[in-house]
Amino acid sequence: MSSFGILLVAFIIYFSHTSPLQYLFVATIALLQAKALAEYYQLAKKKGLEPHVILPVLCSILYIVAHYFFGVDQVVVPFLFLFMALAILRLFSKQENAIANAAVTVFGVVYVTIPLSFLIDINFVHGSIWLVYLLITTKMADTAAYFAGKLLGSHPLAPTLSPKKTIEGAIAGLLGSILTSVAFTSIVDLPIEEALVLGTLIGVISQVGDLAESLFKRDAAVKDSSTIPGFGGMLDLVDSLIFTTPILYFWIHA
């Protein structure tokens, strides 16, 4: 992410509890996940599938907004039933490969939208500091893995999925996540022993998320999900957060 992108994210988070700028945060999450979801559907199209795009993307935006106003407990089940019903009805317009197209359409929302919706709860229910913790700890794992892999990596981690990822990079990413988590104990209500466990979970799960997206891109025979100036592909940007956000959400609620 570019320096401008980092500053923009910092601004949105810092003022997200200031009325009416909290709606800017909600809109940002809604639009970012919508872009990532659309990119996922483009990967599916590269495989010759025909997922419905406009309907699920619009539904995903409405879901994020409803999530903010009503909470996850009130909207997730009705949303899933409504979305699946609409997706099935839409299939009548094209019956070829109906099962595969319906499956990939619904999975996109489950894979991208629902996990990222928990960013709403983390920020507004538990505070911006926990959101900052999540973002920095997750991205530190990604960054440490990238640079250590470039400088020290010699043993492939998953050559069939991502030839450039190495075991050395994965270890560095895990250590980066753990150290970042421990560093946050001075500003968040997180005992040191829990910080070690949570940092380990985030360090491992973030790399699983990265490999999961690599699997999709590999299967679709593309290098990046898309290219956005200053950001790269949105799905590339949030692939780790898709996995780590629910981990932190359920950890806090445990």
Image (spheres, rainbow, N blue to C red):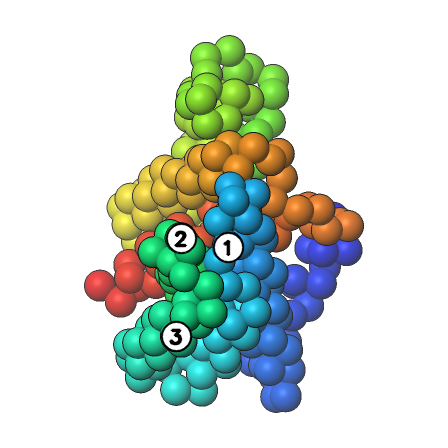
Residue 128 vs residue 65, the one in the foreground: 65
Residue 89: numbered disc: 3
As displayed, is residue 52 above or below residue 169?
below
Q: Is residue 92 left or right of residue 21?
A: left
Q: Which residue is mark 2?
A: 97
Badge 3 local density, few (<14 within 10 Å), some, or many (20+)?
few
Q: Looking at the image, which residue is at 71% across and 46% down?
A: 227
Is residue 119 in sight in this rendering? no
Q: Are marks 3 and 2 in contact (CB under 8 Å)?
A: no
Residue at left offset 60%, top offset 20%:
150
Instruction: Please identify the quarter of the rendering in which residue 35 is found.
Output: bottom right
Q: Secondary structure at mark 2?
A: loop
Residue 29's spot in the image, x, y percent?
56, 68
Which class describes the residues within 10 Å of circle 2: few (<14), some (14-19), or many (20+)?
few
Query: Upstream in the sequence, badge 3 or badge 2?
Result: 3
Q: What SS does tag 1 mark?
A: loop
**Residue type, label 1:** Glu
- Pointer 1: what residue? 50
The answer to whether one can see residue 229 in this image is yes
Q: Secondary structure at mark 3?
A: helix
> Whole-percent x and y of residue 111?
40, 56
Marked residue nearer the N-terminal end (1 or 2): 1
Which image quarter is the C terminus in?
A: bottom left
Under mark 3, the amino acid is: Leu
Instruction: Mark 1: give few (<14), some (14-19) or many (20+) Cα within 10 Å.
Output: many
Q: Earlier in the sequence, mark 1 or mark 3?
A: 1
Question: Do callouts 1 and 2 mark residues in contact (Cβ within 8 Å)?
Answer: yes
